[in-house]
Image: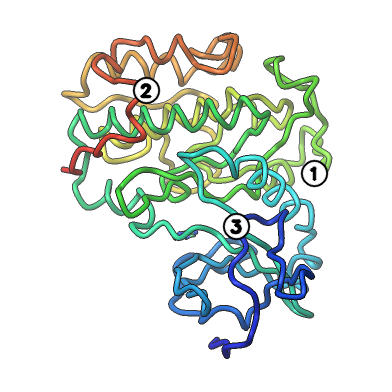
Amino acid sequence: MQAQPTAAAPASTHAATPTPTQANKPTKRTAKDYIFGKLIGEGCYSTVFLAKDIHTGKEYAIKVCEKRQIIREKKREYIKREKDALNMLFNVPHGFVKLYCTFQDDERLYFVLSYAKNGELLPYINKVGSFELNVAKFYAAELLLALENMHAKGIIHRDLKPENILLDENMHLQIADFGTTKILDPETIRSITVKTEDEENPATENDRSRKISFVGTAQYVSPELLHNRVDTRASDLWAFGCIIYQMISGLPPFRGSNEFLTFQKILKMDYEFPEGFPADAKDLVEKLLVLDYSKRIGANDVGDTYDSIRNHPFFDGINWDTVCTQSPPTIS
Ligand code: ADE
């Protein structure tokens, strides 16, 4: 997929503000403004390529979606949510991939995203087996700050997992993949939950496959998302607990030999801590992995910071003002 140079305008800095040409007319980018390189990610309905802007030489991650597939699989809403969420997060300085612009041709939609050079968090966990406590604490702190920023804007991710957490060139984390996002309307941002009959997948009690089609990834899905009854920020806090557990122990807490058995384990809270799991981390994970979402640590915090989580002894020693700008500890 090699694009040929054209005399197009320099890269715009934001999706909402196309760059003026010499004639002062805004131009829209096209695939020809980029040289497409290696494949760096694949999702259910998209493929991500490393791409170079032919005008600036800057590298981007371009997410490409086939229109026919989007329409066939009824994923239009996912595309819209992803674009809306990324636009809302564009000015947050840390913690998220940035959406620089979007464009389309007859067959495809394109999202031009910041390139997180160091890729996904998951292979780092798998490579070292489990993170040293200071490393787990650092990435948990960065993730919490990102969740605070996202939730303050009413954005619930709903598919947080180590594959959706990317690492930039300085090894700071960036959350990606907002296709399963729920954006709460401003009036409901402050309340803990919104009761919904999910608009895309209205499910009945017996309709297990439809319920499940709504959720992201089995191991990190919260009980309330499995029941398909509520949209709550606390679902991301559940996934946060699973990710802390995984960074420290090497594997996510709920693991069945298939998705259904994993869901059963989640609903029964069937998980164990391996021997030697540090006590403060265990206490925090136990306070996040609570079946009743309204009783999870942080679920009742008011304001834009999760103070009850920040103040948990697991985070002793974390400087919340400098986490995102300090040098991350080396993963080991
Ligand atoms: N894979 C998916 N999105 C990516 C991004 N923005 N940077 C690097 N790898 C990715």
Q: Is residue 174 left or right of residue 132?
A: right
Mark 2–mark 3 Cα distance, whole angstroms, equals 27 Å
Q: Is residue 305 left or right of residue 209?
A: left
Q: Nearer the viewer, mark 2 or mark 3?
A: 3
Going from the N terminus, do you reach mark 2 or mark 3 first? 3
Whether the residue under disc 1 has CB within 8 Å of ligand 1? no
Picture coordinates of residue 139, whole percent (x, y) = 33, 34
Q: Amino acid at mark 2?
A: Asp
* Quadrant location, the C terminus: top left
Label 1 belongs to which residue?
Answer: 201
Identify which residue is drawn at 55% across, 59% down.
113
Helix or strand or loop: what does disc 1 sit on? loop
Please tell me whether residue 215 is drawn above or below residue 137 in the rendered image.
below
Picture coordinates of residue 127, whole percent (x, y) = 22, 52
Q: Amino acid at mark 1?
A: Asn
Say the numbered circle drawn on residue 142. Answer: none
Identify which residue is drawn at 65% across, 45% down.
180
Label 3 belongs to which residue?
Answer: 13
Going from the N terminus, do you reach mark 3 or mark 1 first? 3
Please tell me whether residue 104 is drawn above or below residue 125 in the rendered image.
below
Q: Residue farthest to the bottom?
A: 4
Label 2 belongs to which residue?
Answer: 321
